[in-house]
Amino acid sequence: MAILGTILKRGIKLRETLEQDYTSPYELQKKELSKLLISARNTQFGREYDFVSVLESFRNHGGHDFLDKFKANVPVCDYEKMNADWWHKIREGEEDVCWPGKTKFFALSSGTSGAASKYIPVTKDMIRQIRRTGTRHIYTLSKYDLPDKFFQSGMLMLGGSTSLNFSGNYYYGDLSGITTGQLPLWVQGFSRPTPKIKKNKDWAAKLDEIVESAPKWNIGMIVGVPAWMQILIERIIERYHVKDIHEIWPNLQAFVHGGVSFEPYKKGFEKLLGKPVHYIETYLASEGFLAFQSEPNKKSMRLVLNNGIFYEFVPFNDKNFSPDGVIVEHPETVMIDEVEEGKDYALLISTCAGAWRYQIGDTVKLVDKRNSEIIITGRTKHFLSLCGEHLSVDNMNHAIELAAEELNISVKEFTVTGIPDGTLFSHKWYVGTDDEVDSTALCERIDAHLKVVNDDYAVERKHALKNVTLEIIPTTVFYDWMRSEGKEGGQSKFPRVLKGDHLSSWSSFLAQQPKKF
């Protein structure tokens, strides 16, 4: 471990990082798409959509001729289409379907957008992509002002079980379980929990085992989804009757998180600490490792442009999406060099796991075009726009953060739904906090902040958006519902907007709870 610490403290960079530092985003992405098409040209998918003719267009001198040809040949896909037409063949044992060879692993998605879990292919090339990007991310720690003791400590990764399920043709489980089981030996040497605990499929039992082992480990960095990491640390503090987690892990200096915005959790999380830590954001989806925070004190992440993923950006507007967030058949898309700063875009990705023009479901905003820095603003189906208010998850997170700060409370979870209200509409908030707070006061604060950060919301609050209400719910109720939905675990997140089956399930679940929480 001391050797690793020495390497990181010297700030040695990888070749791929240098390539992205000194090459234009356009050139990096053009090259990446070419590599993907060459690799997959003889697959079933590649032959169906004539990748060879797309590759021939790369020889033209037009700036985006190759992209125009790619878009003309290959349709936009969501999970349902990709799975029904192609990925089911892979699970049935066919090879060379969307990517060369057989695919051994499938990641189960967290399922925040739909009721059923999704099976996302994870090829050997994608595992290498995740490992390489993860290594690049680790090397950015050299930019932080960290003491030597940090580099001699371990890393706690709170993820899914490494004991995967086997179907007969493939293994499946959480992406974190797949990738953790495939970590290089030099990482496994300082990764916690122990292999035995990592294999445990019982999430509650796994947390119990980590709590019992916690004092034995010298942890400098923790990695996981904020909600579950907070629950774990609260249990460790309670178990050992200490004031904060630093009494157990004095060298804890960094929390690497992803999946959801950390801001709503930050205030409550900091109550568990004895001293400040660095918060480092990542964008690791079931479909690939897309971006990571590359420097301290930034709220944006740098897209990885030269490691197995090609991006298209779809302007998130009424022209390209229905009010329910469903993408049109032939949306407008642009490349990284054509994206405008400050605008919301939905992502399409083509990857070394055999996803092609695949709608990942997230929306992002470019905040630094020169360095390809983005922030995640929400999900295409987690926007509320009943009457033109265009309320994003980013707006919601910001309003919750400000309101919680003003009222000195910790909000651990929240969700919002839109409902008809006579001939007009209303929003209903469910806020998870264990602090004493007046629901009316909290609702008024959130509403006021949303009017400031979102002009459309402010306009509609005077017209079609008749009312906003809020109900305080104990935090445990949110997690109990997730457990009832089979969504308990390291990668599971509570949906920020409830619609359809999720809303029906949540309403029924609340009706079964005691009237007075």
Image (cartoon, helix red, strand yellow):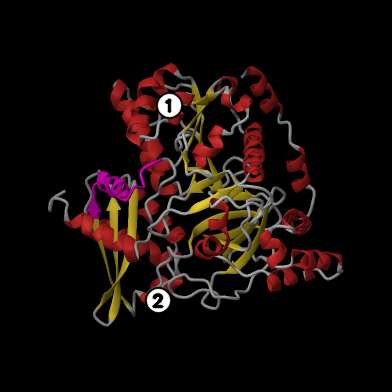
Report whether residue 432 is seen: yes
Mark 2 lies on residue: 459
Q: How many marks?
A: 2
User: On the image, numbered disc 1 is attached to which residue?
Assistant: 197
Q: Amino acid at mark 1?
A: Ile
Q: Quadrant of residue 274?
A: top left
Q: Nearer the viewer, residue 196 or 104?
A: 104
Q: Amino acid at mark 2?
A: Val
* Residue 153, horizontal then vertical, whole percent: 54, 21
Image: 497 above or below 245: below
Drawn side of residue 222 relative to residue 444, left or right: right
Asked if residue 387 lies in the magenta stretch, the reply is no
> For the point 53% across and 44% down, which residue is it?
170
Q: Residue 484 magenta-drawn?
A: yes
Specify the segment rendered in magenta: 472-489
Residue situated in front as seen by the camera: 90 or 486: 90
Measuring 68% from the left and 21% from the top, which residue is drawn there? 6
Q: Quadrant of residue 3?
A: top right
**Does 138 sit above or below residue 304?**
above
Measuring from the top left, give residue 215's x and y in whole percent. 40, 18
Specify the quadrant that holds the N terminus: top right
Real-space Cα separation, disc 1 to disc 2, in angstroms? 52 Å
Q: Residues within 10 Å of mark 2 (few under 14, many from 20)?
A: some
Q: Is residue 426 left or right of residue 165?
A: left
Q: Secondary structure at mark 1?
A: helix
Q: Nearer the viewer, residue 40 or 6?
A: 40
Residue sitting farthest toward the bottom: 423
Residue 375 in the image, given as x and y percentages of width and height: 56, 54
